[in-house]
Image (cartoon, rainbow, N blue to C red):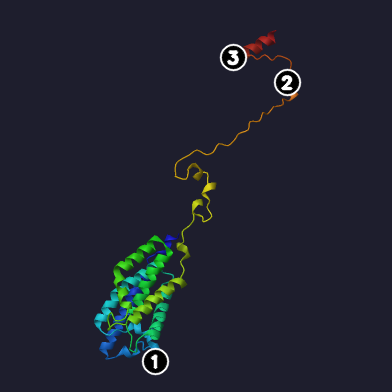
Amino acid sequence: MEENNFKFTNSVVGVPLFFVLFLWFVYWSEIRFGFDFDDNGILPRTFSGMQGIVFSPFIHSNIEHLYNNSIPLVVLLAALFFFYSKEAWGILIFGILSSGFLTWLIGRENYHIGASGLIYVLVSFIFFKGIQTRYYRLVALSLTVVVLYGGMVWYVFPKVDDTISWEGHLSGLISGFVLTFFYKKPEYKKVIKYDWEHPDYDPSEDKFMQRFDENGNFVNLPKIEEFEEEIQLETNPFFQSNSNVVYDFIENQESINEKNESKSES
């Protein structure tokens, strides 16, 4: 399992801040120069309203609307670019397009604006992807997202609040879930280190597991019948002799010299 996939880079901080600052710049431009960007939002099932698929996340009706979307965007985008750095840009771009297109299909005949659809994409993707990987860090991230933003699920249902685009929220939730199947994370699959982790592992053939009975009690291995075979060693006749061999034991070198001198004198 590759722990080095989680690296702190400039994009972890830079992209969320730049994205949110750009939203505030768009809103400031609208107020400062008297623009009305609401007409550039998503108008469902109209050709002119398709431009909102791209532009709607950057348009907000008032400062409260913008403020409520800014903090979740900073948190969720930072988490996305830290834990899913390789997939982050694809999720961000396709999340905007897919959620916007679904909103264009199912939305009410009104202009739909705001980055809340993207927020639901991020919440949905981070939550479901973490559960799918079963990797403890990503699962912990999923649970954190549930704790922070779990209450948002109620705003995907109609008639909860007529002033919000529940269609955009629902579209974002669906889009984030679908994107989890397009972006795989094979590096988070559990690495098999032991024999018992293999799917075809058979405990009955394991010598260690054979020492335990069905109740988990320690038992001895079954005795293996041993057959003793008498092996007769044949002695080579070359090493046999009828003569007796006598050995002298000499303690030191001086005794050897004295013995040699006595032999030479005789």
| Tag of residue 240 | 2
Q: Residues within 10 Å of mark 3 (few under 14, many from 20)?
A: few
Image quarter (top left, top right, bottom left or bottom right) of the C terminus: top right
- Please give left or right for residue 37 compared with residue 235 in the image: left
Mark number displayed over residue 185 = none
**What's the residue at 35%, 69% (across, down)?**
79
Q: Position of residue 59 (x, y in %)?
A: 32, 84
Camera-near label (1 vs 2) is: 1
Mark 1 / mark 3, whichever is N-terminal: 1
Per the model, the C-alpha gap separating discs 1 and 3 is: 121 Å
Which residue reaches farthest left? 64
Q: Position of residue 64 (x, y in %)?
A: 24, 80
Circle 3 residue: 254
Residue type, label 1 = Ser
Residue 261's quadrant in the figure? top right
Tell me which residue sits at (34%, 76%) in the image.
119
- Against 168, is 243 above or below? above
Please tell me which residue is depicted at 72% across the width and 23% down the height of the picture. Answer: 239
Label 1 residue SS: helix
Q: Of tags 1 and 3, which is closer to the observer?
A: 1
